[in-house]
Amino acid sequence: MEIVHLRDIIDVEILQEIQDRFSEATGIAAVTVDFRGKPITKYSKFSRFCSLIRENGRCRDACYQSDAHGGLEAARREEPYIYRCHTGLVDFAIPITVNGQYMGSIMAGQAKIEESELNRLDQIVKEVPGWKDKEEIKAAYDEIPVISYDKIVGAARMMFLVSNYMVEKDMMNLMQEELNAKNLKLMEQVKARAELERALKDTEIKALQSQINPHFLFNVLNTVGRLALIEKAPKTQEIVYALAELLRYILKNINQMVKLEDEIAHIERYLKIQSVRFGDRIQFMLDIPESIRNICVPSMILQTLVENAINHGLEPKEEPGTIKIIGYTLEDDAVIEIIDDGVGMSKDRLHMIQDEYLDMGAISDSTGIGINNVNKRLIYHYGPEYKIKIKSKPNVGTTVKVRIPMKINARRVAHVQSAIGR
């Protein structure tokens, strides 16, 4: 069970005010301590006698022993405990408890009562001899006024009621705040769940709407390809077949690991289709060495980055542009760079895309969404150190760097080859 500290639930300034007014009205010194005996308020009306006597080490230790014993006895009794300290002055400890948990106490007293009443009280620590021989301390002791025992009892009971009522009230307020916070959190969870369920239903509907039989789609594309051949349109036939293979690759490898060689072949088909769209406006160059073509990568990551380079780097550019896709090894990693000489990005735009692995609340266009998707998949497979790196300058171009660990790929290649064999 978590321990609740007195300072956490009570308004110390108000407690200090109550304590000060109590001391002024009764002439009784007071201080409030937590369950460890550590003061949480300042001393109110601390007597000159007690200040002087605590300058002596043995007397000071006896004072601490008196306070500690008094506080423990009050906590054990769960009511005010009135006693005599080692000098014969009357002190009392007022326990502060909530639901049976001892949270601290108010230590008060430093008062005299009639000699005839002293035998009613315990002297819990033996007197330290010698202090009465010092005139200044003896004079300070004589300054302390005599208070009736009944007044001491009344003051102790009054502070017991006030302090515990105050603490219980503040404790109830704290519990209410915690309950409100839990209710708010529960409402947020219910809302999030409702939104998730609604999004799931929307996804299911969209999935149903998009469930076109792949075989039907490929048959149509093959028919269009043969028709283009009959009509003597070989370029159209080539593009249709490229599109068919591109779609077959996407449908077959959704969320799969594939060999880089297959991903490159897919990119070549994609670029062939784009070359029809852009003609001489965009030039493409692929330079991936054989040494890394056998590694495995998450499918579709290169197309996403190449597509971003075309749509957001080169298409807005008035002059012709170039995209280079190059690969090389660096220590234990394979590195693939997608380089374009397009319009580039400002520093602010670049920071917005890269910050916090792309905060989806800050990114709304396809550049951010596409890069965010690639980043998440790379981090999922290889760890956060393998997120993509982007360099860009306005009117110069953009370079996107992807690193793939070679050591992990040894197991993945064997797995992929086994799957292909099946």
Image (cartoon, rainbow, N blue to C red):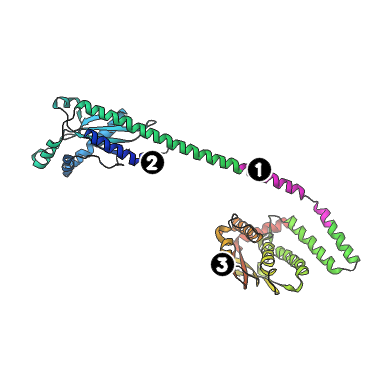
Q: Looking at the rendering, which quadrant does residue 343 occupy? A: bottom right
Q: Mark 1 — residue?
A: 197
What is the spatial separation of the Cα atoms under label 1 and label 2, in whole angstroms? 40 Å
Marks 1/3: CA–CA distance: 38 Å
Q: How many marks?
A: 3
Q: Amino acid at mark 3?
A: Lys
Q: Earlier in the sequence, mark 1 or mark 3?
A: 1
Q: Is residue 376 above or below residue 83?
A: below
Q: Which residue is identified by label 2?
A: 8
Between marks 3 and 2, how big is the CA–CA gap?
Answer: 46 Å
Residue at image position (83%, 53%) is: 216
Main secondary structure type of the part rendered in magenta: helix
Q: What is the quadrant of residue 250 in the picture?
A: bottom right
Q: Earlier in the sequence, mark 3 or mark 2?
A: 2
**Percent of width and height locating residue 60:** 19, 41
Mark 2 residue element: helix
Asked if the stretch drawn in magenta spans residue 210, the answer is: yes
- Ranked by sequence position, the earlier of labels 1 and 2 is 2
Can see residue 383?
Answer: no
| Residue to which mark 3 is pinned | 347
| The residue stretch that appears in magenta | 193-218
Q: Quadrant of residue 254?
A: bottom right
Query: In the picture, which quadrant includes the C terminus?
Result: bottom right
Residue 94 percent across, percent down from the top left: 29, 32
Q: Is residue 406 above or below residue 17?
A: below
Tell me if label 1 and label 3 are in contact, CB under 8 Å: no
Q: Residue at x 12, y 41 (%)?
A: 137
Q: Amino acid at mark 2?
A: Asp
- Residue 48 drawn at (x, y percent): 17, 41
